[in-house]
Image (spheres, helix red, strand yellow):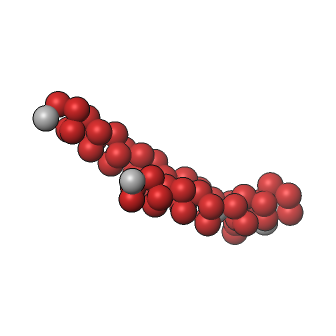
Amino acid sequence: MSKYEEVRDLVASLEADFEAFYEKGNKAAGVRVRKGMQDLKAMAQDIRVDVQARKNA
């Protein structure tokens, strides 16, 4: 479950940047959102690989 907690924490940490970008138009916050989403994508891929390996074991 630690991987789930990592994903949840990452999404929660991006909340302020999402608000700053979409509500206030802060472009620097948009860069942080994009980086965070890229990190989320990598985490999701790692989880998918782990789940597949456990399923096939």
> Going 29% across and 39% down the picture, which residue do you hit?
51
Q: Nearer the viewer, residue 8 or 27?
A: 8
Q: Nearer the viewer, residue 47 or 42?
A: 47
Q: Quadrant of the C terminus?
A: top left
| Residue in view at x 42 percent, y 46 percent | 44
53 sits to left or right of 44 = left
Left or right: where 46 falls relative to 14: left
- In the displayed orientation, state which residue is furthest to the right: 24
User: Measuring 39% from the left and 59% from the top, which residue is drawn there?
Assistant: 2
35 vs 15, left or right, is left
- Front residue of 46/23: it is 46
> Picture coordinates of residue 38 (x, y %)?
49, 53
Q: Residue furthest top?
A: 56
> Disc count in the image?
0
Res. 45 image quadrant:
top left
Image location of residue 8, percent across then percent down: 54, 56
Q: Position of residue 48 (x, y in %)?
A: 34, 40
Q: Residue furthest front?
A: 1
The residue positioned 73% from the left and 66% from the top of the image is 16
Q: Quadrant of residue 53?
A: top left
Q: Is residue 15 visible?
A: yes
Residue 37, horizontal then vertical, whole percent: 55, 53
Residue 31 in sight here:
no
* Whether residue 49 is situated above or below residue 20 in the rendered picture: above
Above/below status of 39 relative to 44: below
